[in-house]
């Protein structure tokens, strides 16, 4: 049994920011855990395009109106304003001053402002096309300088410790659901610990890996969302899965993201026979239309013409010298698989990219469960509505990481340590009956089944038949996996599989329930109504 004041599950931008802000008070004891051996590994690490700030000819109102327009009428105006007002100063303070992130600059020393789809101004700060890598390195280095922060790697959260569910006190049933830490699986020792905390923060990122084609790394399997759902937290907007229009479509490099910034710098989408097609789908924005519109346009072109991919042409629109300087990682990755993007077009397809919904939280990152906060991609602040505006998610992690820290600080100063229950109240993890070793073939096979169901039936274009079929198959699989889980020794892979099927069901059910096409939730059998957009 371990005890800490604040347990933060996840070390991406949202978890790291929450920890850094809390750590300013040297009395606080904070533990950050991550399931990966490397604390840098996260979705945050792979962010390419950059992070929204306030550009030279920009202001709060413009930023808010771009977020709301992209969100297709479902973004929270309050969340958009919080981000637009608080984000840029926090970026200066946390990322530039505390973490020392070297954002790109022009030869005269001024910050270099990038343009991305659906932004009315140049307002994106970047570090080449490796912005996430630079940010995560800076944040983890800053965390390591904090003596009151412990980073535990190779530690997978299995379930939240919630009362009344895990309480030995029968009277707990009459109080609201509250969170008191989590059961953690130690991947080195293969043991499960109770980790008690006064406040618990879910910062576990996204769920892209429940889809066959995704830009997300292997850890994005929706763990936090599944943990919160099992504990009874309110989940909202789960149907709004954003598909990125342009992932590399070359064997051996599938899912590698070709940043929106490539179109921001003039890149144009072409059919394989060289026809520019975006003007047909979005006469005003063309290639810089919101993501949902571009992704569905590509999907439509592929489906109606039988293409296996479309092309993205940057070579004709940017000088060959400028391309490797602005997009060093994309240039190198494409070269590695035989494509010289200074001379030829890039084969691309859409891929699951971002979860706009998640654990419902208020403006301080508080979930519907007492003492449980959620920040970053696992949460739903309402900011992204039905479709996230490019480069806003890193900033959301920063802003709500800071806000959750502020709220927790207030909570702890009001009632120091009273939130931590006595250890006698919380039962140890029950391992009786777990005799079988986890079979990797079953885990991999079931995972692939989930990914195929989600891709074909809960993908870019949905309808009642596809969704009902998905739910039937996922329910059957859920039962199989639950039986497997109840009889098998724990492993990180098994924990991920159980969470993935749980989350896949949450997404599929939300998608079936919502019959109106809006933003990135597109139903071919949509009931007519406002919010419908193109295709
Ligand atoms: C390829 C790519 C490019 C992107 N580009 C951009 C961009 O340019 N700009 C932008 O704003 N956004 C971008 N995004 C989105 C953005 O990167 C993410 O939304 C954001 O980084 C999420 O941050 P987070 O802190 O919420 O989660 P993450 O950064 O994903 O961190 C999650 C953490 O939780 C840990 N974790 C997960 N499950 C468990 C568990 N059960 N137990 C313990 N630990 C666990 C992980 O190990 C990790 O440490 C991109 C995403 C991808 C995939």
Image (cartoon, rainbow, N blue to C red):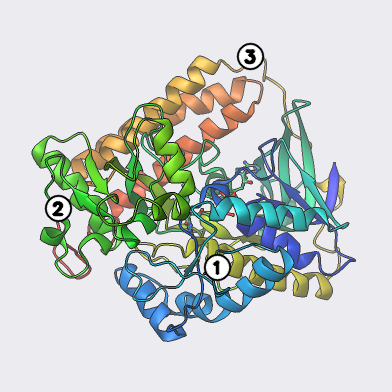
Mark nearest the camera among 1 and 3 is 1
Question: How would you rate the neighbour count of disc 3 (Cα within 10 Å): few for under 14, some for 14-19, many for 20 or more?
Answer: few
Query: Percent x, y for residue 171?
Result: 74, 56
Mark nearest the camera among 2 and 3 is 2
Q: Quadrant of residue 454?
A: top left
Horizontal relation, residue 4 to residue 105: left or right: right
Decide which of tag 2 and tag 1 comes sooner along the chain.
1
Identify the element where label 3 is drawn: loop
Checking the image for residue 436, the label placed there is 3
Q: CA distance from mark 2 to mark 3?
A: 56 Å
Identify the element where label 1 is drawn: loop
Task: Tell me which residue sits at (57%, 26%) in the image.
Answer: 485
Which residue does the numbered mark 1 point to in the structure image?
105
Which residue does the numbered mark 2 point to in the structure image?
276
Residue 458 seen anywhere in this rendered image of the structure: no
Horizontal relation, residue 169 to residue 71: left or right: right
Task: Tell me which residue sits at (13%, 64%) in the image.
Answer: 528
Query: Percent x, y for residue 54?
Result: 50, 78
Judge by depth and name the residue closer to the eye, 268 or 485.
268
Q: CA distance from mark 1 to mark 3?
A: 56 Å
Checking the image for residue 50, the label placed there is none
Judge by depth and name the residue closer to the eye, 235 or 336.
336
Mark nearest the camera among 2 and 1 is 1
Question: How would you rate the neighbour count of disc 1 (Cα within 10 Å): few for under 14, some for 14-19, many for 20 or more?
Answer: some
Decide which of tag 1 and tag 3 comes sooner along the chain.
1
Question: How would you rate the neighbour count of disc 2 (Cα within 10 Å): few for under 14, some for 14-19, many for 20 or more?
Answer: some
Residue 156 seen anywhere in this rendered image of the structure: yes
Callouts 2 and 1 close, C-beta under 8 Å: no
Task: Tell me which residue sits at (66%, 63%) in the image.
Answer: 370
């Amino acid at each position: 049994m371990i005890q800490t004041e604040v347990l933060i599950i996840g070390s991406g931008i949202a978890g790291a920011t929450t920890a850094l802000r809390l750590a300013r008070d040297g009395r606080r004891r904070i533990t950050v855990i991550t399931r990966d051996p490397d604390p840098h590994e996260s979705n945050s690490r792979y962010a390419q395009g950059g992070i929204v700030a306030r550009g030279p000819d920009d202001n709060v109102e413009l930023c808010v109106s771009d977020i709301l327009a992209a969100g297709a009428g479902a973004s929270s105006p309050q969340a958009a304003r919080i981000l637009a007002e608080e984000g840029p100063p926090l970026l200066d303070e946390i990322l530039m001053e505390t973490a020392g992130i070297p954002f790109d600059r022009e030869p005269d020393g001024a910050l270099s402002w990038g343009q991305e789809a659906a932004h009315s101004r140049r307002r994106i700060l970047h570090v080449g096309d490796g912005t996430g890598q630079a940010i995560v390195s800076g944040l983890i280095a800053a965390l390591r300088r904090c003596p009151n922060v412990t980073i535990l790697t190779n530690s997978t959260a299995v379930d939240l410790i919630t009362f009344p569910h895990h309480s030995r006190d029968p009277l707990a049933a009459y109080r609201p659901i509250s969170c008191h830490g989590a059961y953690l699986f130690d991947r080195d020792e293969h043991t499960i610990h109770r980790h008690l905390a006064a406040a618990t923060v879910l910062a576990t990122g996204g769920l892209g890996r429940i889809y066959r084609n995704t830009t997300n790394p292997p850890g994005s399997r929706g763990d936090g969302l599944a943990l919160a759902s099992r504990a009874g937290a309110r989940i909202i907007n789960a149907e709004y899965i954003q598909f990125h229009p342009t992932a590399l479509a070359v064997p051996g490099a599938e899912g590698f993201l070709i940043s929106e910034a490539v179109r921001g710098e003039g890149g144009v989408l072409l059919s394989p026979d060289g026809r520019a097609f975006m003007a047909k789908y979005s006469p005003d924005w063309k290639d810089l239309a919101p993501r949902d519109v571009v992704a569905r346009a590509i999907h439509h072109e592929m489906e109606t013409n039988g293409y296996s991919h479309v092309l993205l042409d940057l070579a004709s629109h940017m000088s060959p010298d400028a391309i490797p300087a602005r997009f060093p990682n994309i240039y190198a990755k494409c070269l590695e698989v035989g494509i010289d993007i200074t001379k030829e077009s890039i084969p691309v397809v859409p891929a699951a990219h971002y979860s706009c919904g998640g654990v419902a939280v208020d403006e301080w990152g508080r979930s519907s469960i007492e003492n449980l906060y959620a920040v970053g991609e696992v949460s739903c602040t309402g900011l992204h509505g039905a479709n996230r505006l490019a480069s806003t998610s890193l900033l959301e992690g920063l802003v709500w990481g800071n806000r959750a820290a502020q709220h927790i600080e207030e909570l702890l100063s009001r009632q120091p340590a009273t939130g931590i229950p006595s250890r006698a109240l919380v039962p140890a993890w029950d391992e009786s009956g777990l005799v079988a070793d986890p079979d990797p073939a079953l885990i991999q096979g079931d995972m692939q089944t989930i990914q195929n169901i989600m891709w074909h039936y809960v993908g870019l274009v949905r309808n009642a038949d596809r969704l009902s079929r998905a739910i039937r198959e996922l329910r059957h699989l859920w039962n199989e996996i639950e039986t497997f889980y109840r009889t098998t020794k724990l492993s990180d892979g098994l924990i991920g599989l159980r969470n993935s099927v749980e989350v896949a069901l949450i997404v599929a059910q939300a998608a079936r329930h919502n019959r109106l096409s809006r933003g990135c939730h597109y139903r071919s059998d949509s009931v007519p109504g406002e919010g419908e957009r193109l295709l």
